[in-house]
Image (cartoon, grey):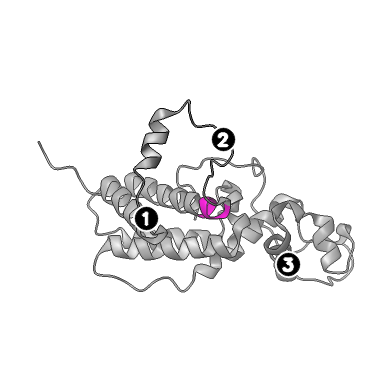
Amino acid sequence: MTDAAGRSGDGGAGRQPIWARPERGTRGPAPTHSREAIVAAAITLADTEGLAAVSMRAVAGALGTGAGSLYRYLSSRDDLLDLMTDRVVGELRPYPPEQDDWRDEMLLVARQQLALFRAHPWLVDVIQRPSGVGPESLAWFDNCIRILEPVPCAVTTKFEAIAVLTGVVSLFARSEAAGSPGFAGIDLGAYPHLVAALGRVGPPTPPTDLFERTLRSLLTGLLTPASPR
């Protein structure tokens, strides 16, 4: 679940990936916590209090230890965010069952991804970090490439489509968290086109229908070759 184009987030430049390092340093006393326990505590903190609450000190406090002890396992908060990201992406397993049509299968992948963002709202803020592409993120990406194998288009186009899918799912997750915009207390007299449009608004489109229609249209438009004129 990452941006195939490699757009950068914060941190990670010139830093050896956490996946390439041993679980803990060789110096210091025997470990009292595992990397697994540290990451689990950080995820619980992010789920309950938000990403801003996740600091080395706060995670250490949740584990009943000092912040300095965590540096035996991690060199920075960036390492922690990378591990948290990959750990929750692992919750996407098992992947949805195979479908007869690749669009149906990619839509199931997108729905599963949206459910993950709902379960861990902070994930939308860290998912694009290039340093956070770990084993589970690569496995998810590999599954998407498998689904798109029958599609007769360039591999780079498939990479772009997967990145767009993740971006659109992230937008839906953010919009759900933000709620619907309201105009209460605002004088709309200076916006006649908006007033006219609001007067023609019918019943709201079910969010599930909008989600499916948007993604089907995007995937078809990006991955289906245009008919010759």
Which quarter of the figure has residue 63? bottom right
Give the answer, above or below, for where 199 lies relative to 116. Answer: above
Residue found at x 50% / y 65%: 115
Q: CA distance from mark 2 to mark 3?
A: 51 Å
Front tag of 3 and 1: 1
Residue where numbered disc 2 is placed:
186
Tell me the kind of residue under disc 3: Arg
Residue found at x 18% / y 42%: 226
| Left or right for 161, reference 138 | left
- Image spot of residue 161 (x, y percent): 36, 48
What numbered label is drawn on residue 205?
Answer: 1
Q: Earlier in the sequence, mark 1 or mark 2?
A: 2
The answer, for residue 31, to whether it is visible in the render is yes
Residue where numbered disc 3 is placed:
35
- Image spot of residue 152 (x, y percent): 22, 52
Tell me the kind of residue under disc 1: Thr
Q: Which residues are magenta?
A: 173-177
In front: 105, or 141? 105
| Left or right for 226, reference 123 | left
Front tag of 2 and 3: 2
Is disc 1 in contact with disc 2, using a CB cutoff of under 8 Å? no
* Predominant secondary structure, magenta span: helix
- Image spot of residue 200 (x, y percent): 34, 43
Q: Residues within 10 Å of mark 2 (few under 14, many from 20)?
A: few
Q: CA distance from mark 1 to mark 2?
A: 24 Å
